[in-house]
Image (cartoon, grey):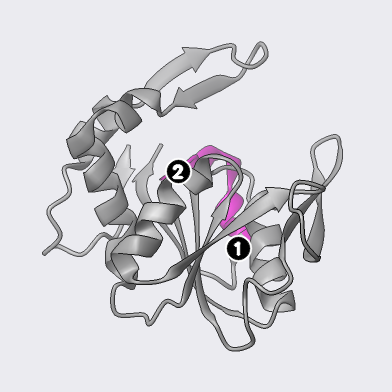
């Protein structure tokens, strides 16, 4: 496990955060090692440290909007937006938002999916930080970057709790430097 580039003047106990992420073997199907963040969410200090660590590299980036990816990106994205003095935009799976949307389809291992935001959520020239819990294969992250740009926003960063380095998702985000608190 490695730690990424949270600024040194930010007090974040990454070991305490990592200790509160539980591995669940064979969930949701055999062969998958699921990273369960519910113990982290239940611990105020670990949750506060996670939000601080996700936001810290972008505190001087002039972030206007934070896009949180469904569903666990919502959990971290909203408090990161508050920390940065920005608005929060939920990026949802297709068909979940009630007003006009901008959408971005993307490929999955078996099939395709679509991520959407409300058409009026990101204004032209907005400086946008994308937040999620995990960077795995990078498919959802790539779709989110493309969606923000399609909406007229500028992606200033991509911040995640953990990066699963073996899945090489960073390669699909070569035009955006992902920030991960933890690399596993």
Q: Quadrant of the N terminus?
A: top left
Compare marks 1 and 2 and give the one earlier in the sequence: 2
Tell me the SS state at disc 2. Answer: helix
Q: Is residue 54 among the parts visible in the rendering?
A: yes
Q: Residue at x 79, y 61 (%)?
A: 104
- Say whether residue 15 is visible: no
10 Å crowding of disc 2: few (<14), some (14-19), many (20+): some
x, y percentage for residue 25? 52, 12
Residue 75: x %, y % from top left: 45, 43
Which mark, residue 67?
none
181 in the magenta segment: no
Secondary element at tag 1: helix
Apparent side of residue 60 relative to residue 131 in the rendered image (left or right): left
The residue positioned 60% from the left and 63% from the top of the image is: 173
Q: Main secondary structure of the magenta part?
A: helix
Q: Which residues are magenta?
A: 162-172
Q: Which residue is mark 2?
A: 75
Q: How many marks?
A: 2
Q: Is residue 158 above or below residue 166?
A: below
* Quadrant in which residue 171 is drawn: bottom right
Q: Are marks 1 and 2 in contact (CB under 8 Å)?
A: no
Reply yes or no: does residue 168 show up in magenta. Answer: yes
Pointer 1 residue = 173
Compute the Cα span from label 1 to label 2.
Answer: 22 Å
Residue farthest toward the bottom in the current orientation of the protein: 125
Report the residue at 21% width, 35% height from top. Answer: 44
Q: Residues within 10 Å of mark 1 (few under 14, many from 20)?
A: some
Whether 79 is drawn above or below 61: the answer is above
């Amino acid at each position: 496990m490695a730690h990424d580039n949270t600024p040194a003047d930010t007090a974040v106990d990454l070991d305490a955060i990592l200790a509160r992420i539980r591995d669940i073997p064979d969930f949701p199907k055999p062969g998958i090692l699921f990273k369960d963040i519910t113990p982290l969410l239940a611990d105020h200090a670990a949750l506060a440290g996670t939000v601080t660590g996700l936001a810290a590299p972008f505190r001087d980036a002039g972030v206007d909007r934070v896009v949180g990816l469904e569903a666990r990106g919502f959990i971290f994205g909203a408090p990161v937006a508050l920390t940065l003095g920005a608005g929060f935009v939920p990026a949802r799976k297709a068909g979940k938002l009630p007003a006009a949307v901008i959408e971005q389809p993307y490929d999955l291992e078996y099939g395709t999916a679509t991520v959407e935001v409300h058409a009026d959520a990101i204004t032209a020239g907005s400086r946008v930080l994308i937040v999620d819990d995990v960077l795995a294969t990078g498919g959802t992250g790539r779709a989110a970057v493309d969606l923000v740009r399609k909406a007229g926003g500028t992606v200033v960063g991509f911040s995640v709790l953990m990066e699963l380095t073996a899945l090489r998702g960073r390669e699909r985000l070569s035009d955006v430097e992902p920030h991960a608190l933890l690399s596993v």
